[in-house]
Image (cartoon, helix red, strand yellow):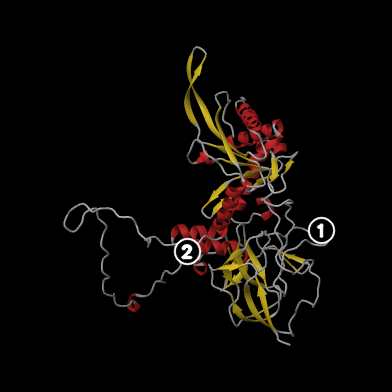
Amino acid sequence: MSNKNTFYLPDLGEGLPDATIVEWSVKVGDTIRLDDALVSMETAKAVVEVPSPVSGKVLKLAGEPGDIIITGAMLAEFEVDPSMPQRAAGQDTGHGHGGPAPAKGVGSDDPGPDNKVVASDEGGAIAEAEAPRADSGTVVGAMQSSDAVRSEQAVAVGGVKAMPAVRALARKLKVDLSRVRATGADGVVTMGDVKQAAADGSARAGAAVAQPAAAQPAPAAAAPVAATRSTLSQAGKPMRTQPPGVSASGQPEQLKGVRRNMARVMADAHAKVVPTTLCDDADLHAWIGKQDITARLIRAIVAACKAVPALNAWFDGDKLVRTLHPHVDIGIAVDTDDGLFVPALRNADVLDASGVRTAIKRLRAQVEDRSIPASELSGYTISLSNFGMFAGRYATPVVVPPTVAIVGAGKLSHDVVAVIGGIEVHRRMPISLTFDHRAATGGEAARFLKALLDDLALPN
């Protein structure tokens, strides 16, 4: 009987067809123990630490950091060592191994975050647990292995202790972790350490370490200076512009992680939704004192959902089934360098302004350090895009199934408004409401928008 074991990349709990290698914790020839860290993989929502399914010698690894691995493809190959701890044959991990099962998320009938990751000796697969268990989902570093959930911990690779998400950030910012000053407990490199090193350039990856003057190599011959671009030809005449042709001068970049998933989600939404957008302006002239604009937007959306529940809903276009929700969970679009995240503000209908602000700060912080649980990125009942924080008055925000509507808030402006007896300058906020016209009528959308505008017009 062969002692070789091939480990296939499991579905990391999101139903995605692939994941990107961030960093290997081992190299070919190393000996690894059961459930020790094998590799950090970046998915659309998190950086996940994948544990080893066996104890033994590493014979083969699937790729290098930055490579994309297809779910179900070979991730690593081992020579199993019978003298080391192994998972018992037939040991029940609470999961099936018959192949990837559809992940539960925004586009499913049951968006509950009950999927878990199995690092089994058969490659692992996602299935529903036979008995209720705490969610491991794709929380960073929380992986279901056997019957225990592994909490995220800093793993020492190359003598440097850091979380998987910190290693991913260092790779993105081109920071050499071995040269970063660690400030975390027990010498762990933190997110802040990496950002500081990137800002001051003290640990730039690939930068040569300073050498004594005597050891400096002789300077090489000067490289030829590239020709500078000019609008004139060598004869001094204006050059005629030409299309780029077949070969582009830019560097092609394969989408990975969050941006890769964003592309899939937007394409899916475009194919499945019948979008219609209504636009109007909220008059904020009556506001008293300084107010939290985001909190007011959340409150107004909640008021509109109560007035017209048809837009606080999910719609299954295949079965033509609409589900109205008694609660309001608002997906808040968060823009990052990695791409778009939409964490869910749960139970927005029972939060006051202070609760809204606290919850949004927590969600943003978790998004920034990539520690947000996958369960917080799905299952919302309606969405908000506050794009006006940057620029833009009106938009056509994208409705992501199964939700029915999304509210877009544009840039605040001071507009001249006609009033009885003359004109006044009022502070106003452009509002765009996109809804799936299969699930809601134009009248319902218009009444929803009016209820939202009416709440925003209140003094406080």
**Amino acid on which the number 1 mark rests in the picture:** Pro
Q: SS at mark 1?
A: loop
Give the farthest residue toward the right: 131
Q: Which residue is mark 1?
A: 132
Of the 4 image quadrants, the one containing the N terminus is bottom right
Q: Which residue is mark 2?
A: 174
134, 122: nearer the viewer: 122
Q: Position of residue 185 (x, y in %)?
A: 62, 63
**Gap between marks 1 and 2 measured at Cα:** 42 Å
**Amino acid on which the number 2 mark rests in the picture:** Lys
Q: Which mark is residue 44?
A: none
Q: Position of residue 177 (x, y in %)?
A: 52, 67
Location of residue 293 (image quadrant)? top right
Question: In the picture provided, is 387 more to the left or to the right than 89?
Answer: left
Question: In the picture provided, is 424 more to the left or to the right than 364?
Answer: left
Q: Earlier in the sequence, mark 1 or mark 2?
A: 1
Q: Residues within 10 Å of mark 1 (few under 14, many from 20)?
A: few
